[in-house]
Image (cartoon, rainbow, N blue to C red):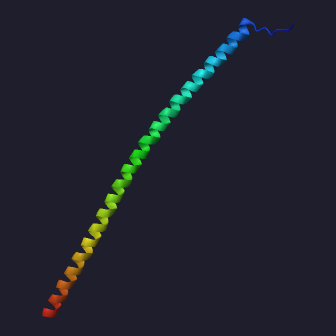
């Protein structure tokens, strides 16, 4: 019968490799969780900025309409004044 024997040094080296692999996996999981949290925060920030931009665009549209209305009223008043002269 042949049995594979592992020396103490080989077993300790293997144990160190396993422990190192576990540490690397732990670090990678933490980095992934941090990256996912950052992505979620950036998504929320993007949604907020999108809403702000939409509100700003709406305000610009309203102001443009108001400006056009004022321009038309002024033109109409100028026209009326020209008719008086």
For the image, the number of numbered tags is 0
Query: Residue 51 falls in which quadrant of the image?
Result: bottom left
Is 40 placed left or right of 12 in the picture? Answer: left
Residue 75 x %, y %: 22, 83
Residue 21 x %, y %: 62, 22
Vertically, is 58 above or below 39? below
Which quadrant does the C terminus fall into? bottom left
Is 59 placed left or right of 37 in the picture? Answer: left
Which quadrant does the N terminus fall into? top right
Who's the residue at 54% across and 26% down the image? 27
Q: Is residue 53 visible?
A: yes
Who's the residue at 51% across and 29% down the image? 30
Residue 37 x %, y %: 45, 37
Query: Residue 65 falls in which quadrant of the image?
Result: bottom left
Query: Residue 44 falls in which quadrant of the image?
Result: top left
Is 14 placed left or right of 56 in the picture? Answer: right
Who's the residue at 80% across and 10% down the image? 4
Is 6 placed left or right of 60 in the picture? Answer: right
Vertically, is 70 above or below 12? below
Who's the residue at 73% across and 11% down the image? 10
Q: Which residue ends up furthest to the left in the rendered image?
A: 84
Toward the viewer: 54 or 76?
54
Q: Which residue ends up furthest to the right in the rendered image?
A: 1
Toward the viewer: 59 or 76?
59
Toward the viewer: 55 or 85?
55
Q: Is residue 85 visible?
A: no
Vertically, is 64 above or below 49? below
Residue 24 x %, y %: 59, 24
């Amino acid at each position: 019968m042949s049995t594979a024997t592992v020396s103490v040094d080989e077993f300790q080296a293997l144990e160190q490799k396993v422990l190192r692999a576990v540490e690397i996996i732990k670090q990678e999981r933490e980095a992934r969780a941090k990256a996912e949290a950052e992505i979620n925060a950036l998504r929320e920030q993007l949604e907020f900025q999108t809403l702000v931009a939409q509100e700003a665009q709406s305000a610009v549209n309203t102001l443009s309409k108001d400006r056009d209305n004022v321009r038309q009223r002024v033109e109409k008043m100028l026209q009326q004044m020209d008719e008086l002269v």
